[in-house]
Image (cartoon, rainbow, N blue to C red):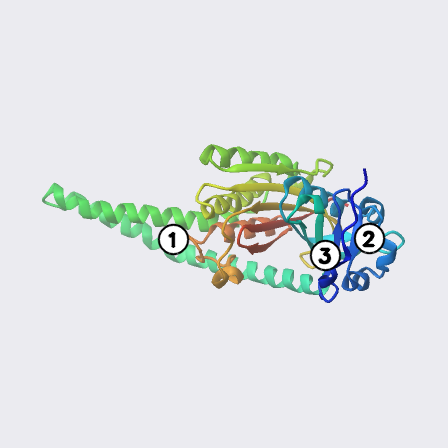
Amino acid sequence: MSAMPFPESDFSGLDSLSTSTLVLDAEGLIRYVNPALETLLGVSGAVLVGEAADQAFGRSPEFLDAILTARSEQETIVEYELDVAVSGHPPMRVGCNISPLDRPSQGILVEMHSIDPHLRIARLEQARLQQEANRELLRNLAHEIKNPLGGIRGAAQLLEHELPRESLREYTQVIIKESDRLQSLMERLLTPHRMPRFGAVNIHEVLERVRSLILAETPSVTLRRDYDISLPEIRADSEQLIQATLNIARNAVQAMRGQGKIVFRTRVARQITLESRRHKLGMRIEIIDNGPGIPDDIREQIFYPLVSGREGGSGLGLTVAQTLVAQNHGSIDCESRPGHTVFSLFLPLPN
């Protein structure tokens, strides 16, 4: 039995929106297209309305997959970059929010916006320069602190042997333990600076390793996979990628206080720019959580060293992750709002 058409008045208020919008019914038929979407896609709404989405967007598998996920999971799916192509028209790069309507029988609301590739290239170049500055700062900072620490710890040990009373050794133990803690921190600062050891890497094996570690540490977290198993192996350092994704996943767990859902998603990324080079094909690894989101006041600085939104955090996890991914010729991007944070890792695929 076919779905009943929506009353025209239900969506007439969307006509004046500047956001490109379309509505699908429960059977996947396009029931409404606003003027902004007609302009964005360069096609008349009269052509689209009444057509099945999988026919109208048959050359857009990622877009159709996102619609199916939003419908099955009954949650909003945010895609920051994907190709959408209407029959007979060239594909275009867009971002979109895909949301189930309040009553599931009424289907899906899709909001699209075009992406200016020059803005993303500029953002990635800025991130690359920031990574280089971070690496230099961390290297200098670690070396400047590491050497005096050894002297402080050694002096505290010598002093401990000269103290007349056992009770006084409590103070030297504080010095020794705090020196060891700072020494460990310095080692973490220097760890990313070893050269990567490239080899064939299956990204899903990397993610499964991280998944097992996260679930062992925090069994209360729900961790779902959404893998594109057709992705080929890449040349990378598997240990560095494990550490990078583990740092991001642990940040998500800590932000959610051990309660919530994380999704590991892999997809093909087309026409991406990495290290100022254009790649026809790349890999996008997304780590998605439904935590509180990144505070507005640090959102633009989350990859800077010693910046943390968590009390007691070192502010090094994301900095190290960014450095490790950059050493594997990739980049990290982040989008966040309350209830939905996505860290996207982009890596080149072999030609």
Which quadrant holds the C terminus?
top right
- Lateral position of residue 18 relative to residue 217, left or right: right
The residue to which callout 1 is attached is 311
Three-letter code, disc 3? Asp
Res. 170 visible in picture: yes
Q: Could you tell me which residue is drawn at 78 percent across and 55 percent down?
A: 32
Answer few, some or many: residues within 10 Å of disc 1's Cα (few below 14, many 20 plus, some between 14 and 19).
few
Q: Position of residue 350 (x, y in %)?
A: 74, 44
Q: Nearer the viewer, mark 1 or mark 3?
A: 3
Which residue is at the front of the view, 305 or 195?
305
- Lateral position of residue 346 relative to residue 135, left or right: right
- In the displayed structure, 96 sits above or below 165; it is below
The residue to which callout 2 is attached is 85
Answer few, some or many: residues within 10 Å of disc 3's Cα (few below 14, many 20 plus, some between 14 and 19).
few
Which residue is at the front of the view, 286 or 144?
286
- In the displayed structure, 132 sits above or below 101; it is below
Q: Position of residue 223 (x, y in %)?
A: 55, 37
Classify mark 1: helix, strand or loop.
loop
- In the displayed structure, 113 sits above or below 4; it is below
Which quadrant holds the N terminus?
top right
Q: Earlier in the sequence, mark 1 or mark 3?
A: 3
How far separated are the C-alphas under marks 1 and 3? 47 Å
Three-letter code, disc 2? Ala
Identify the residue at the far left of this view: 164
What is the number of the mark on residue 10? 3
Q: Nearer the viewer, mark 2 or mark 3?
A: 3
How far separated are the C-alphas under marks 2 and 3? 27 Å
